[in-house]
Image (cartoon, coloured by chain):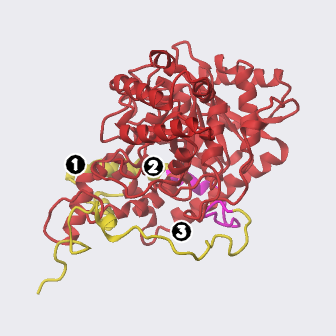
Chain colours: A red, B yellow
Amino acid sequence: MSASVAGLVALTIPAVQKGLAKRDFSAVELARSALDFAEKENPKTNAYLHFSPERALAAAQKVDQKLAAGEDPGPLAGVPLAVKDVIVTKGVRTTCGSRLLEHYIPPYDATAVIRLEQAGGIVLGKTNCDEFAMGSSTENSAYGPVRNPVALDRVPGGSSGGSAAVVAQGTAVVALGSDTGGSVRQPASFCGVVGVTPTYGRVSRYGLVAFASSLDHIGPFGRTVHDAALLLQTIAGRDECDSTSAFAPVPNYVAELDGKVAGMKIGLPREYFEGLASESGDLILKGVEVLKKLGCEVREISLPVTKYAVPCYYIIATAEASSNLARYDGVRYTIRAESGTLSDMYRATRGVGFGAECKRRIMLGTYVLSHGYYDAYYLKAQKVRALIADDFRKAFAEVDAIVAPVSPSPAFKIGEKIDDPLEMYLSDIYTITGDLAGIPCMSVPCGKTSEGLPVGMQILTRHFDETGMFRLADAFEKAGGFAG
Amino acid sequence: MKITEKEVRYVADLANLQLTDAEIGRLAKDLDEILTHIDTLNELDTSHVQPMAQVLYDAGETATLRADTERAPLGNEAALANAPLAGNGYYKVPKVIER
C-alpha cells in the first residue's frame, strides 16, 4: 500500500475513515504500513520504546471484519495510534521509562486503552517518557532521551515527549499522554501539535501508573483540534474502576466545532505575560489578534497567586509521588537487587532502580511529609492550592476562556537544563496552575520562532467546558492561527 | 542551609532509598535550593483558607459505589507473574525473622 505510506506523515482521523470507506486500503494494510514506517523512522527520535505489532494487526483484522460484514467499525476505526508507556497495556511491556519496570508485563489494560480499541483504534506501540512521568524534557528516561522531530538537537518537552514526537513525526496519527504538571501541553507546544489536559476526573485514571493521584490526567495528542477532541470523547466518561472519575455526561465535542466564537469573552492573565521570552510572547499576542478578528472580546485579567504555583505544586506532587512510588520495593515488580535482609533488599532495589530525578522527588516528598514538617509544607501547599483554584473561579465569573503561553521559551537543547532542577521546575509555571485547579486546558500551535521552533498557545476554560475550549481552538486553527 | 547531609541520610532512610555519598552531597545541594524557593509560600497569609486535597464535584453520597455483582478476579498466577521471586502461590522475600 504505497499510497497510504506516502500519506502517513500527514494522515488525520477523517482521512483514515475516508480511505477505509473508499476501500483505498484495508485496516490491516494501513496498520502494516504504519508499523513499517514507524519502525523505520523511530531511530531518528527514539520516541517509541517498543512496538506491539501482534496486537495492532489483530485489532486491524477486527476492523476489516466489521467493514466486510457491513457493521459500524467505530469512530477510530483503523487509526494508528500510540500510548505513553505509563499507561498499562495487557501483555505489552510497560516500563514507565524506568529500569525498575524493564520487564514488567501488565496483567490488565487501562480503561482508556480499552475504550480506544473498542472504538476501532490500532495501538502501534508505547512511547518514551520521563521516568514515571517526572520531568519536562524526556531526558529522564532510562532508555535514552527523545529528540524533537522539528529540531533533532532539541528536547521534545516532557514528560509525554514520546507521544508528542510521534504525532509531530507522523509515526502515529494520534497518541495518549499523561499530564500532572504540564506533561501533555508543554511537549505539544514544543513539537507543534495539539495536546489536551481534560478536566480532572473526565478520563478514568485506571491503568495510568500513579505519579501524583490528585493531579494525574490522561490526555490526547493530535495534529488537529478535531482529532484530539474525537480522541477525548472516545476515552472520557465515568468508569467504576476509578472512583474519582466524573459522572458528568460526555458531550459530542466534535459536533460542537461550529466556529461560533464571536462574542466569547477571553481573559489574558497579566501574570502569565510578565517575563515571557519575547518571541514566544509576540507569537501568542499575534494569535490573540486572530481571536479578536473572529469576534472574541479580549480583556486583561489577573491571577495573583500564580507566582506561588511552582512551590505549591512541587510540595503536593512530590509528597504524593513519594507515597505512590513506595510500591517499587523489589517484591512485586520484576527487578530485585539481592542484599542481606528484607530491609536492605528494599533499599538496594530502589537505590539502583530509580533514576536521579525520581530520587530527588521521592526525597523532597518524604521530607515535606516527615514528622514535624507536615503543617509547614503539605498543609500549607493544600491551602495555597485552594487559593489558586479560587483565582480561576473568580476569573471565570468574568470571562469564558483564558488564553496564555504554555512555556516561557520554545524547545531547548538536549542537556541544556538537565543539571539545574530548580530552573527546570520553574519552567512549568504556566502549566501547573491548570492541574492544581483541575480545569481543562490545552495547547494549540501558534506559529514558529525565527529559528523554526513551534510555540503553543494555551486555552483554559471552566470545569467540564471542554466544548468551549475545543470550539475556540478549532476556530483559531481554521482561521489560520496555526500558521502564525 | 535548609537541610544538612545528615538530614538527607535520615530522609533517605525513611524513604527506603540506598544512596551513594556522591548522591547525598548532590541531593543536599538540590533540596536546599528547592526548599529555599518553597519558603516563598510563607509570604501568603493562609490562616483562613480551607485546604484543598482534591478536585471534587457534586454527586450523591453513594454514587461512587458500584453494583454488587460478581466479577472474575485477577487470579493468583497473573498477580504473581511479575514477581522477581515467587513460589507456592506467594511472593518470596528474604527472611525477616531469625530463629
Residue A127 left/right relative to B71: left
Whole-percent x, y for residue B40 in the image? 56, 51
Residue A90 visible in this rendered orientation of the protein: yes
The secondary element bearing badge 1 is classed as helix
Q: Chain of mark 1?
A: B
Magenta residues, as a range? B38-56
The image's mark for residue A87 is: 2
Residue lying at 43% horizontally and 70% vertically, measured from the top left: B73
Locate residue A268: give its quadrant: top right
In the rendering, at what x and y percent does residue A408 appear?
Answer: 56, 31
Disc 2 residue type? Ile
Report the residue marked by disc 1.
B22
Which residue is farthest front?
A69
Residue A456 in magenta?
A: no
Circle number at residue A375: 3
Amino acid at pointer 1: Ala
Numbered disc 3: what chain? A
Q: Between A300 and A45, which is closer to the camera in this rendering?
A: A45
| Residue occupying the far top of the picture | A450
